[in-house]
């Protein structure tokens, strides 16, 4: 005999930041929450990211190409699914700018936004060569050494270069368009390493424009009474 269904899972609609496409989701269930908790307990960045992506894929009611979601798509969608599943308010211990005391502050994560700037994705290196940039997908990042670099604190060397090549969509000449998908990581790395410092800095400017989760809040320090204005940015600030 089949067991009865306990609940009808609520459905809601979200907008994917990078595309503006609306997609329906359900809240996550205990089976998904269990996997998320196990991933967080592991302290392994790759496992935590995989659990987030698996949760989004499991909860999507409409067709969703998970491999095409950008880093900020995944962070935003997961945050909003979590808000609908276990509550929109989280409590963070925020540091006072005056005395460094930590004060517990409630944050409504439903109010988190992702501002996608209008930037030129074509970067001119020389009169003959340009680069067409893109925001990397979470899958691109997971397949690279970027997460391993973050775990080791190697943010300025290997991790930075790994992220750079994942931001290249194509290399352009007056006659041809060389898609990054048709090149190996080694070939793209060789190309990046052949750039001058000034040329490479143009790529880093684009990377610095990458959207993030953002929420601003005010709080009064419970110890010294100072008024604080805090801008939270990125998944790490919220969880």
Image (spheres, helix red, strand yellow):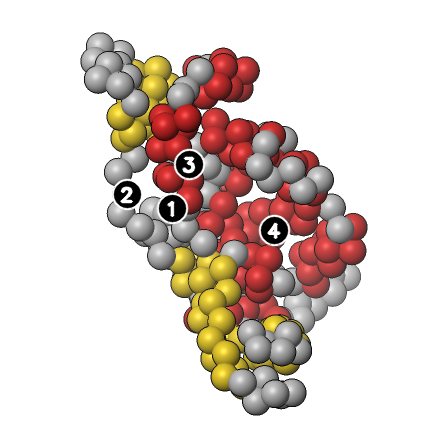
Q: Earlier in the sequence, mark 4 or mark 1?
A: 4
Q: Of tags 4 and 1, which is closer to the observer?
A: 1
Q: Are the two marked residues, 3 and 4, in contact with CB atoms closer than 8 angstroms?
A: no
Q: Are the two marked residues, 1 and 2, in contact with CB atoms closer than 8 angstroms?
A: yes
Q: Of tags 3 and 4, which is closer to the observer?
A: 3
Q: Earlier in the sequence, mark 3 or mark 2?
A: 2
Relative height, residue 104 to residue 164 (above, below): below
Relative height, residue 211 to residue 101 (above, below): above
Disc 4 secondary structure class = helix
Disc 3 secondary structure class = helix
Determine which quarter of the picture holds residue 206: top left
Q: Earlier in the sequence, mark 1 or mark 2?
A: 2
Mark 3 → mark 2, Cα distance in angstroms: 13 Å
Mark seen at residue 209: 1
Q: Residue at x 62, y 63 (%)?
A: 239
Mark 3 lies on residue: 204
Give the left or right position of residue 38, taking residue 63 as reference. Answer: right
Q: Of tags 3 and 1, which is closer to the observer?
A: 3
| Total tally of numbered discs in the picture | 4
Mark 4 lies on residue: 52
Mark 1 → mark 2, Cα distance in angstroms: 8 Å
Q: Earlier in the sequence, mark 3 or mark 1?
A: 3
Mark seen at residue 119: 2
Determine which quarter of the picture holds residue 1: bottom right
């Amino acid at each position: 005999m089949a067991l009865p269904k306990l609940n009808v899972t609520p459905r809601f609609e979200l907008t994917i930041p990078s595309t503006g496409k609306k997609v329906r989701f359900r809240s996550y269930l205990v089976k998904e929450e269990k996997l998320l908790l196990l991933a967080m307990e592991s302290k392994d960045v790759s496992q935590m990211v995989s659990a987030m992506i698996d949760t989004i894929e499991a909860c999507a009611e409409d067709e969703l190409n998970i491999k095409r979601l950008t880093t900020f798509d995944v962070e935003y969608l997961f945050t909003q699914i979590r808000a609908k599943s276990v509550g929109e308010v989280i409590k963070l211990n925020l540091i006072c700018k005056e005395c460094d005391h930590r004060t517990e502050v409630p944050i409504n994560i439903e109010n988190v936004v992702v501002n996608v700037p209008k930037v030129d994705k074509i970067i001119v290196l020389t009169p003959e060569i340009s680069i067409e940039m893109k925001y990397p997908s979470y899958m691109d990042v997971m397949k690279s050494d970027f997460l391993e670099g973050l775990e080791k604190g190697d943010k300025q060397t290997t991790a930075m270069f790994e992220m750079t090549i994942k931001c290249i969509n194509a290399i352009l000449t007056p006659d041809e368009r060389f898609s990054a998908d048709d090149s190996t990581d080694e070939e793209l790395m060789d190309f990046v390493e052949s750039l001058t410092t000034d040329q490479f800095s143009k790529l880093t400017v684009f990377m610095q424009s990458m959207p993030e989760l953002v929420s601003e809040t005010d709080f009064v320090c419970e110890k010294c009474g100072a008024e604080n204005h805090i801008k939270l940015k990125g998944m790490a600030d919220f969880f």
